[in-house]
Amino acid sequence: MTEKDFMSKTVAKDGIGGKVAFRSPSNIALIKYWGKREGQVPANPSISFTLETCATTTGLTYKKLEKAVPDFSFELFFEGRPKADFRPKIETFLARINPYMAFLKDFHYVIETSNSFPHSSGIASSASGMSALALCFMELERTLDPTMDPDFFKAKASFLARLGSGSACRSIEGPIVQWGQHKDTEGSSDYFALQYPYPVHEVFNNYQDTILLVDKGQKQVSSTVGHDLMHGHPFAEQRFKQAHSNLSRLKEVFAKGDLDNFIKIVESEALTLHAMMMTSMPYFILMKPNTLEIINKIWEFRASSNTHVCFTLDAGANVHVLYPESEKEIVLQFIKDELIVYCENGHYICDQIGQGAFELKGTV
Ligand code: DP6
């Protein structure tokens, strides 16, 4: 599918109104997206576990206007209250998806959104938030065009979510999702994500992710700025190549359930992401001393316990602790005994690999 395939000429009849709602999860990348080109095109392919517990719920109430308006007409509520500081992000999103949804300016919208995790947890809500919103707009498009193919619905939802935030395109489906053109993955695209299409060993079923909230404060450098610093970065080309080859290596790892190599790839990706930050100009560090304390504790515990616990990081100080479900009891005990002390106010979130977004029918 190309960009053109996503341009909808669907028009809305007068008097149309209604409400749709979706719950969309967050995701944690194993191979990291870091660096992009114009139009939210990733510099390298990425792959993630879709999460289950960390999610955004968004409702979209729509009412056809008597006359289309020059600007987007919407109200925005976050956790029940008007949220003016979220408006610019939504406006940018609407402007980006407008060429693909001819009917967009024909409606007035009320967007109501809330997260399952506290806003000030340091957990980025852009992936879950933008994917939930993209799904709501797709549902509106499907209402206007009920013959829409279900696969097209998912691909276009991912396509639109990407325009809101790159990683959001990986939150439509689960449990493992890949985004970005890659020679060894049939059907892969820079424009939308797809469910990982190759065999995955059962050891990855219900894979656990305990998120240690090391620092709940606002990040000093946003992902958008960080991506931008990959332009002219001295190690960029090498890094992009590495992501491609790590993705090829993961294929066998997933098929065989080779956890030792899974750990090597995932931890190396996390540290490489932060190494890119430390070696860009200007350089910056998002890890905190407690991030490193936790990493060292995980390495010590893994060596002494013969478990397969490992870590990954997103663009912040929090640590995602990944482990198979069969090791849940022993690893959770270790986390409680030795890692919680490094979390801000002792806070952490137990999550696991999930099945993706779904519509909240009949509850709205
Ligand atoms: C480190 O998707 O937040 O989490 O496209 O600018 O919204 P924008 O960036 P974003 O970047 C995510 C970066 C990452 C890695 C990843 O999720 O692959």
Image (cartoon, grey):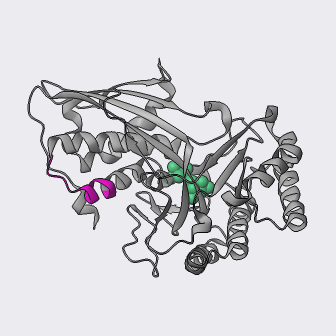
Residue 254 counted in the magenta span = no
Seen from the viewer's position, the closer of residues 364 and 283 is: 364
Instruction: Using the rendered view, name the quadrant where residue 15 is placed.
Output: top left
Q: How many marks?
A: 0
Tell me the magenta residue range. Answer: 146-155
Position of residue 123 measured from the top left corner of the image (x, y, whole percent): 63, 41
Which quadrant does the N terminus fall into?
bottom left
Which quadrant does the C terminus fall into?
top left
Hey, which residue is sitting farthest top in the picture? 81
Position of residue 275 measured from the top left corner of the image (x, y, whole percent): 74, 64
Would you say residue 297 is visible in this rendering? Answer: yes
Q: Is residue 121 left or right of residue 335?
A: left
Would you say residue 228 is visible in this rendering? Answer: no
Q: Is residue 77 left or right of residue 363?
A: right
Seen from the viewer's position, the closer of residues 218 and 349 is: 349
Residue occupying image coordinates x 74% and y 56%: 283
Position of residue 20 measured from the top left corner of the image (x, y, whole percent): 30, 33
Position of residue 80 measured from the top left corner of the image (x, y, whole percent): 47, 19
Task: From this view, report whether residue 184 is shown above or below residue 9.
Answer: below
Task: From this view, report whether residue 288 is shown above or below residue 235.
Answer: above
